[in-house]
Image: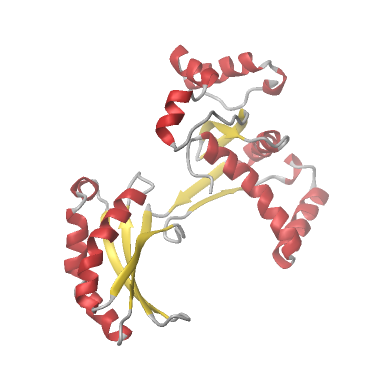
Amino acid sequence: MTSRIPGFYKLPPNERLKAVAEQVAVGSEEISQVERGLVLDQAEKMVENVIGMFQVPLGIATNFVIDGQEVLIPMATEEPSVIAAASNGARMARGGGGFLTSSTGPVMRAQIQATGIDDPFAARQAILLHKDELMAMANELDPMLVKYGGGVKDIEVYVIDSRLGPMVVTHLIVDCRDAMGANAVNTMAEALAPRIEQITGGRVYLRIISNLADLRLARAKAVFRAEDIGGPEVVDGIILAAELAVVDSYRAATHNKGIMNGVTAVVLATGNDTR
């Protein structure tokens, strides 16, 4: 297949859909699902108090080469120019080989918050002494995840000062494999909470996933040839604009919002959590 479809934006919507279907080799059933979208019965099973659907345009960003593969990118957004800009940027990146990506392991954290502890640093050491036991308890809850190479890989414990006194917060470091991980991670945290209380003599309140996924990172880079983006003067302008975003929060907010225009559009189009 190829993501380079000249004149794609000039086609009527039904012809665009047909062109995409031909490139990715999908059949009439998948095409009808795109045309029909979500139906009320499906929505009723997804969230509470459903009264209808809220539609957002679904488009395709063309011209992407990612890790040597031609890719057509679905994007759902209400804002004009986002899909066009992504397609144009991808076209300009093709001359330098497109985009190269890398990622860390699919690792998430659970937090177990223990409170009301007289000696929090001793409690921290006690939890660490029971680390192997706690990891084994957690992994017994999801043998399928462990079978495929996932599960709890480590435990970290922090003493955190607060206005309401010190808290001992245990982090379960969980390899979630292909899952987002909330269900598995939360189940593990909830199951370990009573044992944490026994070990520390404290009271556990929060026992839940953290969405600060600092161990689950994805990176992408591309090299743009000066001649493909308008010459050396344009390169200088881009670098100076980016530098302003580094040193000025007003520019940074807009700079980052422009990046998130593309990120959230792809996340929404692929049925993921845009938050």
Residue positioned 57% across, 14% down in the render = 18
Q: Residue at x 41, y 82 (%)?
A: 165
Question: In the picture shown, does residue 174 fall above or below 195?
Answer: above
* Spot occupied by residue 260 in the image (x, y as percentages of width and height): 62, 48
Query: From this viewpoint, which residue is outermost toward the right?
Result: 233
Q: Is residue 211 visible?
A: yes
Q: Nearer the viewer, residue 216 or 167?
A: 167
Q: Quadrant of residue 92?
A: top right
Q: Position of residue 194 (x, y in %)?
A: 22, 67
Q: Is residue 9 left or right of residue 99?
A: right
Residue nearest the viewer, comparing 243 with 130: 130
Q: Quadrant of residue 229?
A: top right
In the image, taking residue 15 as reference, residue 275 lies left or right, namely left
The residue drawn where x is 24% and y is 72% is 197
Task: State the residue in front, 81 or 69.
Answer: 81
Residue 65 in picture, x, y percent from top left? 56, 35
The picture places residue 25, in percent across and down from the top left corner, at: 46, 18
